[in-house]
Amino acid sequence: MKLRWIALFGLLAFFAQPALAQKLKVEQGSTNILNGVSKMNISYDYSDMSVGKFKTEAEYITKKKEEYNKKEAGKGDKWEADWKADRTDRYAPQFEELFNKYCKIQVGDYPSERYTLIVKTTRTEPGYNIHISRKNAEIDGEVWLVETANPSVPLLKISFKKAVGRSFGGYDYDTGFRIQEAYADLGKALGKYLSKL
C-alpha cells in the first residue's frame, strides 16, 4: 500500500513539473503594444549562446565534433551539420506550432508585418539519456518584440528561464529531440502568456 502512494505521488509530481518549470518575466516595455496585432514575423538568434558547461557554442561544437570523429571518421562532421540544421528543421517549427496553437497572434514567415518576434537563446543545456540516467534539456533567453524595419531596438523584452525538453516514456535519446521539446515548451508557455492580453 505504501509503495502505491509513493508511485502516485511520483506520477503527480512528474505531471505538475511542466507548470512549474517555465519562468517568463517582462523585462522591458509592455505587452499592451500587442493589442490589435494578429500576425507577426519571427526570427531566431543563437549568436550569444552558451551550451552545457561551455561558455560558447563554438567550444561545445569543437569538443563534441572531436569526440565523435575519434570514434568514427566523419561522424563529428555529420553531428555538427545536424546540430545546426535542427534549428530550422526542429526547433523553429516546434516553437511556432505550439505558440500558434495557444495564442491568438500568429507567428511565421511574415516579413511584411509591422512587428517581428525574435527568440534569443542565451543558454542551452542539451541534457542526456543513457538508459540508466537522464537529464532534461533546457533553454534560457529572451524574446524581443521589435519593429521589423528596426530589429536592433526592442519595444518589449520577455525573459524565459528553464524551458524544459522532456518526453513521456523517456525515449529521448536524441539531443535534437530533447532540445526541440524545450522549444515546444517555450512556445506553449509564451503563447498562453500572451493570449491573456
Image (cartoon, rainbow, N blue to C red):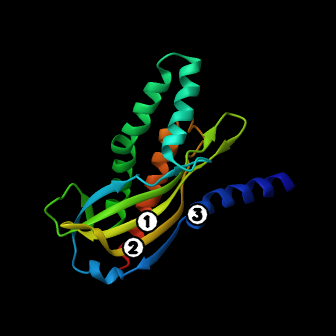
Disc 2 from disc 3: Cα separation: 20 Å
Label 2: element kind: strand
| Residue closer to the observer: 156 or 91 | 156
The image shows a total of numbered marks equal to 3
User: Relative to 150, is 103 on the left or the right?
Assistant: right
Residue type pointed to by label 1: Glu
Mark 3 and mark 1 residues within 8 Å of each other at the beta carbon: no
Q: Residue reaching furthest top?
A: 73
Which disc, if any, is residue 142? 1
Q: Quadrant of residue 120?
A: bottom left
Label 1: element kind: strand
The picture places residue 38, in percent across and down from the top left corner, at: 21, 70
Q: Is residue 27 above or below residue 169?
A: below
Q: Residue reaching furthest left?
A: 112
Mark 1 and mark 2 residues within 8 Å of each other at the beta carbon: yes
Which disc, if any, is residue 21? 3
Disc 1 from disc 2: Cα separation: 7 Å
- Residue under the image location 76 percent in, 53 percent down: 7
Residue type pointed to by label 3: Ala
Q: Which residue is mark 2?
A: 157
Q: Earlier in the sequence, mark 2 or mark 3?
A: 3
| Residue closer to the observer: 178 or 9 | 178
Residue type pointed to by label 2: Lys
User: What quarter of the picture does the C terminus occupy?
Assistant: bottom left
Which disc, if any, is residue 183? none
Q: Quadrant of residue 41?
A: bottom left
Quick one: label 1, few (<14), some, or many (20+) residues within 10 Å? many
Q: Residue reaching furthest right?
A: 2
- Residue under the image location 41 percent in, 69 percent down: 192
Q: Earlier in the sequence, mark 1 or mark 2?
A: 1
- Residue under the image location 62 percent in, 48 percent down: 53
Q: Nearer the viewer, mark 3 or mark 1?
A: 1
